[in-house]
Amino acid sequence: MKSIFSRLKSSIKVGKMLLLVCLAALISYFCLFPQLFYCQTIRLSAFRSSGDGMFVSPEIKESHHHLLRSIIHSAEMRVDSFYSGLRSKPKLIICATPAEYERYCSGVEGAGCSLGTPWGESFIVVNMEGINVDVISHELSHIELLKRLGWWETTFRVPQWFNEGIALMLDRRFVDIQDPVGRYLAYSDEWLSYSGGQMILELDEIASLKTFFRGKPRQVMLAYMTSGMEVSYWVASMDSTGFSQFLHLMESGLSFAEAYGKVQDLNQSEYRKILPMNPLRLRRSNSKGG
Protein backbone atom coordinates (compact mmCIF):
# COMPACT_ATOMS: atom_id res chain seq x y z
CA MET A 1 0.00 0.00 0.00
CA LYS A 2 2.82 2.37 0.92
CA SER A 3 4.49 1.61 -2.41
CA ILE A 4 1.29 2.51 -4.30
CA PHE A 5 0.96 5.85 -2.52
CA SER A 6 4.64 6.56 -3.15
CA ARG A 7 4.23 5.93 -6.90
CA LEU A 8 1.04 8.02 -6.97
CA LYS A 9 2.80 10.88 -5.20
CA SER A 10 5.69 10.65 -7.65
CA SER A 11 3.28 10.67 -10.64
CA ILE A 12 1.50 13.76 -9.30
CA LYS A 13 4.84 15.51 -8.90
CA VAL A 14 5.86 14.67 -12.46
CA GLY A 15 2.44 15.80 -13.72
CA LYS A 16 2.82 19.16 -11.97
CA MET A 17 6.25 19.61 -13.48
CA LEU A 18 4.96 18.84 -16.97
CA LEU A 19 2.07 21.24 -16.46
CA LEU A 20 4.48 23.99 -15.42
CA VAL A 21 6.71 23.29 -18.44
CA CYS A 22 3.71 23.44 -20.81
CA LEU A 23 2.48 26.65 -19.19
CA ALA A 24 5.92 28.23 -19.48
CA ALA A 25 6.14 27.19 -23.14
CA LEU A 26 2.69 28.66 -23.85
CA ILE A 27 3.60 31.96 -22.19
CA SER A 28 6.89 32.10 -24.09
CA TYR A 29 5.10 31.40 -27.38
CA PHE A 30 2.62 34.19 -26.69
CA CYS A 31 5.40 36.64 -25.80
CA LEU A 32 7.36 35.82 -28.95
CA PHE A 33 4.46 35.57 -31.42
CA PRO A 34 1.44 37.41 -29.96
CA GLN A 35 -0.26 38.14 -33.32
CA LEU A 36 0.07 34.53 -34.45
CA PHE A 37 -1.28 33.33 -31.10
CA TYR A 38 -4.33 35.59 -31.43
CA CYS A 39 -4.91 34.37 -35.01
CA GLN A 40 -4.73 30.75 -33.91
CA THR A 41 -7.26 31.38 -31.15
CA ILE A 42 -9.61 33.50 -33.28
CA ARG A 43 -12.44 31.02 -32.65
CA LEU A 44 -12.37 32.00 -28.98
CA SER A 45 -12.86 35.70 -29.80
CA ALA A 46 -15.99 37.71 -30.49
CA PHE A 47 -15.32 37.54 -34.24
CA ARG A 48 -18.10 35.81 -36.15
CA SER A 49 -17.20 32.68 -38.10
CA SER A 50 -18.92 32.13 -41.41
CA GLY A 51 -17.96 28.45 -41.46
CA ASP A 52 -15.80 28.80 -44.57
CA GLY A 53 -12.64 30.13 -42.98
CA MET A 54 -13.78 33.75 -42.78
CA PHE A 55 -13.86 35.50 -39.40
CA VAL A 56 -15.53 38.90 -39.30
CA SER A 57 -15.38 41.64 -36.70
CA PRO A 58 -18.56 41.97 -34.63
CA GLU A 59 -18.50 45.64 -35.67
CA ILE A 60 -19.36 44.64 -39.26
CA LYS A 61 -23.03 43.97 -39.93
CA GLU A 62 -23.97 40.44 -40.95
CA SER A 63 -25.81 41.88 -43.94
CA HIS A 64 -22.38 42.77 -45.37
CA HIS A 65 -20.99 39.24 -45.11
CA HIS A 66 -22.30 38.25 -48.54
CA LEU A 67 -20.38 41.12 -50.14
CA LEU A 68 -17.24 40.09 -48.27
CA ARG A 69 -17.53 36.53 -49.59
CA SER A 70 -17.95 37.86 -53.12
CA ILE A 71 -14.78 39.97 -52.83
CA ILE A 72 -12.81 37.03 -51.43
CA HIS A 73 -14.07 34.75 -54.20
CA SER A 74 -12.95 37.24 -56.87
CA ALA A 75 -9.50 37.44 -55.25
CA GLU A 76 -9.27 33.64 -55.15
CA MET A 77 -10.15 33.43 -58.85
CA ARG A 78 -7.45 35.96 -59.71
CA VAL A 79 -4.80 34.00 -57.79
CA ASP A 80 -6.08 30.69 -59.16
CA SER A 81 -5.64 31.97 -62.71
CA PHE A 82 -2.09 33.26 -62.16
CA TYR A 83 -0.89 30.20 -60.23
CA SER A 84 -2.77 27.74 -62.48
CA GLY A 85 -4.65 26.44 -59.45
CA LEU A 86 -5.25 27.46 -55.84
CA ARG A 87 -3.95 25.08 -53.17
CA SER A 88 -3.92 27.27 -50.05
CA LYS A 89 -6.87 27.76 -47.71
CA PRO A 90 -5.89 30.44 -45.21
CA LYS A 91 -8.24 31.75 -42.54
CA LEU A 92 -9.30 35.31 -43.34
CA ILE A 93 -9.66 37.71 -40.42
CA ILE A 94 -11.53 40.89 -41.29
CA CYS A 95 -11.09 43.76 -38.83
CA ALA A 96 -13.19 46.88 -38.44
CA THR A 97 -11.05 48.98 -36.10
CA PRO A 98 -7.34 49.86 -35.80
CA ALA A 99 -7.23 48.14 -32.39
CA GLU A 100 -8.51 44.87 -33.89
CA TYR A 101 -6.07 45.07 -36.76
CA GLU A 102 -3.12 45.72 -34.46
CA ARG A 103 -4.11 42.73 -32.34
CA TYR A 104 -3.93 40.30 -35.25
CA CYS A 105 -1.39 42.04 -37.49
CA SER A 106 1.58 43.76 -35.87
CA GLY A 107 1.19 47.53 -36.22
CA VAL A 108 -1.64 49.64 -37.63
CA GLU A 109 -0.03 50.57 -40.95
CA GLY A 110 -0.95 48.89 -44.20
CA ALA A 111 -4.20 47.42 -45.46
CA GLY A 112 -3.42 43.76 -44.89
CA CYS A 113 -0.87 41.20 -43.81
CA SER A 114 -0.33 37.46 -44.07
CA LEU A 115 1.07 35.00 -41.53
CA GLY A 116 2.19 31.42 -41.99
CA THR A 117 3.69 28.70 -39.82
CA PRO A 118 6.18 25.88 -40.52
CA TRP A 119 3.41 23.35 -39.79
CA GLY A 120 1.05 24.68 -42.46
CA GLU A 121 -1.34 27.07 -40.74
CA SER A 122 -1.89 30.36 -42.55
CA PHE A 123 -3.86 33.55 -41.97
CA ILE A 124 -4.71 36.71 -43.86
CA VAL A 125 -5.66 39.79 -41.85
CA VAL A 126 -7.21 42.88 -43.46
CA ASN A 127 -8.62 46.14 -42.14
CA MET A 128 -11.41 48.24 -43.61
CA GLU A 129 -9.05 49.65 -46.27
CA GLY A 130 -8.06 46.13 -47.25
CA ILE A 131 -11.54 44.80 -48.02
CA ASN A 132 -11.02 44.75 -51.78
CA VAL A 133 -9.88 42.31 -54.43
CA ASP A 134 -6.42 43.85 -54.85
CA VAL A 135 -5.32 43.68 -51.21
CA ILE A 136 -6.71 40.19 -50.64
CA SER A 137 -5.15 38.95 -53.91
CA HIS A 138 -1.80 40.39 -52.80
CA GLU A 139 -1.86 38.66 -49.42
CA LEU A 140 -3.29 35.44 -50.87
CA SER A 141 -0.36 35.34 -53.31
CA HIS A 142 2.06 35.34 -50.37
CA ILE A 143 0.19 32.43 -48.78
CA GLU A 144 -0.06 30.50 -52.07
CA LEU A 145 3.69 30.81 -52.66
CA LEU A 146 4.23 29.61 -49.09
CA LYS A 147 1.98 26.62 -49.78
CA ARG A 148 3.71 25.73 -53.04
CA LEU A 149 7.33 26.04 -51.90
CA GLY A 150 7.06 25.42 -48.18
CA TRP A 151 7.67 27.68 -45.20
CA TRP A 152 11.43 27.17 -44.97
CA GLU A 153 12.10 27.67 -48.68
CA THR A 154 9.87 30.74 -48.95
CA THR A 155 11.16 32.33 -45.75
CA PHE A 156 14.89 31.72 -46.17
CA ARG A 157 15.57 30.89 -49.82
CA VAL A 158 13.21 33.06 -51.85
CA PRO A 159 14.16 36.77 -51.85
CA GLN A 160 11.52 39.14 -50.52
CA TRP A 161 11.64 41.27 -53.66
CA PHE A 162 10.43 38.27 -55.64
CA ASN A 163 7.68 37.42 -53.14
CA GLU A 164 6.43 41.01 -53.22
CA GLY A 165 6.91 41.33 -56.97
CA ILE A 166 4.74 38.29 -57.68
CA ALA A 167 2.08 39.65 -55.32
CA LEU A 168 2.13 42.92 -57.30
CA MET A 169 1.31 41.02 -60.48
CA LEU A 170 -2.06 40.28 -58.83
CA ASP A 171 -2.45 43.59 -57.02
CA ARG A 172 -3.64 46.32 -59.39
CA ARG A 173 -3.55 49.27 -57.00
CA PHE A 174 -0.34 50.66 -58.50
CA VAL A 175 -0.44 49.41 -62.08
CA ASP A 176 -3.76 48.35 -63.61
CA ILE A 177 -2.41 47.06 -66.92
CA GLN A 178 -2.57 43.37 -67.77
CA ASP A 179 -0.67 43.45 -71.06
CA PRO A 180 2.79 42.08 -70.06
CA VAL A 181 4.82 44.74 -71.89
CA GLY A 182 2.51 47.58 -70.84
CA ARG A 183 2.66 46.44 -67.23
CA TYR A 184 6.46 46.37 -67.26
CA LEU A 185 6.63 49.85 -68.83
CA ALA A 186 4.17 51.18 -66.25
CA TYR A 187 6.23 49.77 -63.38
CA SER A 188 9.34 51.30 -64.95
CA ASP A 189 7.59 54.68 -64.89
CA GLU A 190 6.53 54.17 -61.26
CA TRP A 191 10.09 53.19 -60.34
CA LEU A 192 11.48 56.30 -62.03
CA SER A 193 8.92 58.46 -60.22
CA TYR A 194 9.91 57.15 -56.78
CA SER A 195 13.65 56.93 -57.43
CA GLY A 196 14.02 60.21 -59.27
CA GLY A 197 16.73 58.38 -61.16
CA GLN A 198 18.99 58.87 -58.14
CA MET A 199 17.75 56.91 -55.10
CA ILE A 200 18.31 53.37 -56.32
CA LEU A 201 17.81 50.09 -54.47
CA GLU A 202 19.63 47.06 -55.83
CA LEU A 203 17.76 43.78 -55.64
CA ASP A 204 20.19 42.26 -53.17
CA GLU A 205 19.48 45.21 -50.86
CA ILE A 206 15.83 44.19 -50.54
CA ALA A 207 16.25 40.42 -50.48
CA SER A 208 15.19 39.92 -46.86
CA LEU A 209 11.97 40.85 -45.09
CA LYS A 210 13.88 43.14 -42.74
CA THR A 211 15.75 45.07 -45.42
CA PHE A 212 12.73 45.31 -47.71
CA PHE A 213 10.61 47.16 -45.15
CA ARG A 214 13.25 49.22 -43.42
CA GLY A 215 13.40 52.94 -44.05
CA LYS A 216 10.82 55.65 -44.54
CA PRO A 217 7.54 55.08 -46.46
CA ARG A 218 8.98 56.45 -49.70
CA GLN A 219 11.89 54.02 -49.56
CA VAL A 220 9.50 51.11 -48.89
CA MET A 221 7.43 52.19 -51.90
CA LEU A 222 10.61 52.30 -53.97
CA ALA A 223 11.32 48.74 -52.82
CA TYR A 224 7.86 47.71 -54.07
CA MET A 225 8.32 49.46 -57.42
CA THR A 226 11.81 47.96 -57.83
CA SER A 227 10.30 44.52 -57.23
CA GLY A 228 7.40 45.20 -59.58
CA MET A 229 9.74 46.35 -62.35
CA GLU A 230 12.02 43.30 -62.08
CA VAL A 231 9.26 40.69 -61.78
CA SER A 232 7.06 42.26 -64.49
CA TYR A 233 10.06 42.16 -66.84
CA TRP A 234 10.69 38.53 -65.90
CA VAL A 235 7.04 37.59 -66.47
CA ALA A 236 6.86 39.47 -69.80
CA SER A 237 10.04 37.81 -71.06
CA MET A 238 8.50 34.33 -70.75
CA ASP A 239 5.53 32.63 -72.34
CA SER A 240 2.32 31.92 -70.41
CA THR A 241 3.68 28.69 -68.90
CA GLY A 242 6.81 30.28 -67.48
CA PHE A 243 5.67 30.90 -63.91
CA SER A 244 4.16 27.42 -63.57
CA GLN A 245 7.42 25.90 -64.79
CA PHE A 246 9.35 28.03 -62.32
CA LEU A 247 7.26 26.63 -59.46
CA HIS A 248 7.82 23.10 -60.77
CA LEU A 249 11.59 23.64 -60.94
CA MET A 250 11.62 24.97 -57.38
CA GLU A 251 9.48 22.07 -56.15
CA SER A 252 11.88 19.63 -57.85
CA GLY A 253 14.78 20.94 -55.76
CA LEU A 254 16.46 23.68 -57.79
CA SER A 255 17.59 26.78 -55.93
CA PHE A 256 15.78 30.05 -56.52
CA ALA A 257 18.61 31.49 -58.62
CA GLU A 258 18.80 28.34 -60.79
CA ALA A 259 15.05 28.16 -61.37
CA TYR A 260 14.71 31.92 -61.95
CA GLY A 261 17.33 31.90 -64.68
CA LYS A 262 16.59 28.52 -66.25
CA VAL A 263 12.89 29.19 -66.80
CA GLN A 264 13.74 32.32 -68.80
CA ASP A 265 15.97 30.31 -71.13
CA LEU A 266 13.31 27.63 -71.62
CA ASN A 267 10.28 29.90 -72.10
CA GLN A 268 11.16 32.97 -74.12
CA SER A 269 8.11 35.00 -75.12
CA GLU A 270 7.43 36.88 -78.33
CA TYR A 271 7.97 40.11 -76.38
CA ARG A 272 11.55 39.27 -75.35
CA LYS A 273 13.23 41.09 -78.26
CA ILE A 274 11.18 44.28 -77.96
CA LEU A 275 11.34 44.69 -74.18
CA PRO A 276 13.39 47.71 -73.10
CA MET A 277 16.08 46.46 -70.72
CA ASN A 278 15.44 46.75 -67.01
CA PRO A 279 18.38 48.79 -65.62
CA LEU A 280 18.31 46.78 -62.37
CA ARG A 281 18.13 43.34 -63.95
CA LEU A 282 19.12 40.45 -61.69
CA ARG A 283 22.57 39.38 -62.85
CA ARG A 284 22.94 35.64 -63.30
CA SER A 285 26.42 35.55 -61.81
CA ASN A 286 25.39 37.45 -58.67
CA SER A 287 21.90 36.07 -58.19
CA LYS A 288 21.13 35.02 -54.61
CA GLY A 289 18.33 33.10 -53.02
CA GLY A 290 17.78 35.69 -50.28
Image: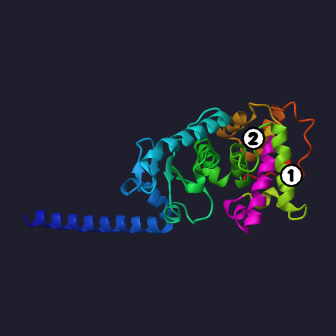
Which residue is identified by label 2? 259
What is the secondary structure assignment of the residue under circle 2?
helix
What is the secondary structure assignment of the residue under circle 1?
helix
Queried whether the magenta region covers residue 229, the answer comes back as yes
Q: CA distance from mark 1 to mark 2?
A: 28 Å
Q: Main secondary structure of the magenta part?
A: helix
Residue 282 visible in this rendered orientation of the protein: no
Residues shaded magenta: 208-234
Query: Total number of numbered labels?
Result: 2
- Residue type beneath disc 2: Ala
Is residue 8 left or right of 261 when viewed as pictured?
left
Q: Position of residue 152 (x, y in %)?
A: 60, 51
Disc marking residue 173? none
Q: Which quadrant would the N terminus be assigned to in this image?
A: bottom left
Is residue 185 left or right of 131 when viewed as pictured?
right
Residue displayed at 63% across by 60% down: 110
Which residue is identified by label 1? 189
Residue displayed at 12% across by 66% down: 5
Q: Is residue 169 above or below residue 204?
A: above
Residue displayed at 82% across by 53% down: 190
Asked whether disc 1 touches disc 2, contact meaning CB atoms under 8 Å apart, the reply is no
Dividing the picture into quarters, in which one does residue 239 lie? top right
Observer-nearest residue: 64 or 126? 64
Q: Position of residue 219 (x, y in %)?
A: 77, 65
Q: Position of residue 65 (x, y in %)?
A: 47, 45
Q: Is residue 124 above or below residue 1?
A: above
Q: Position of residue 108 (x, y in %)?
A: 58, 65
Q: Which quadrant would the C terminus be assigned to in this image?
A: bottom right
Dividing the picture into quarters, in which one does residue 258 lie? top right
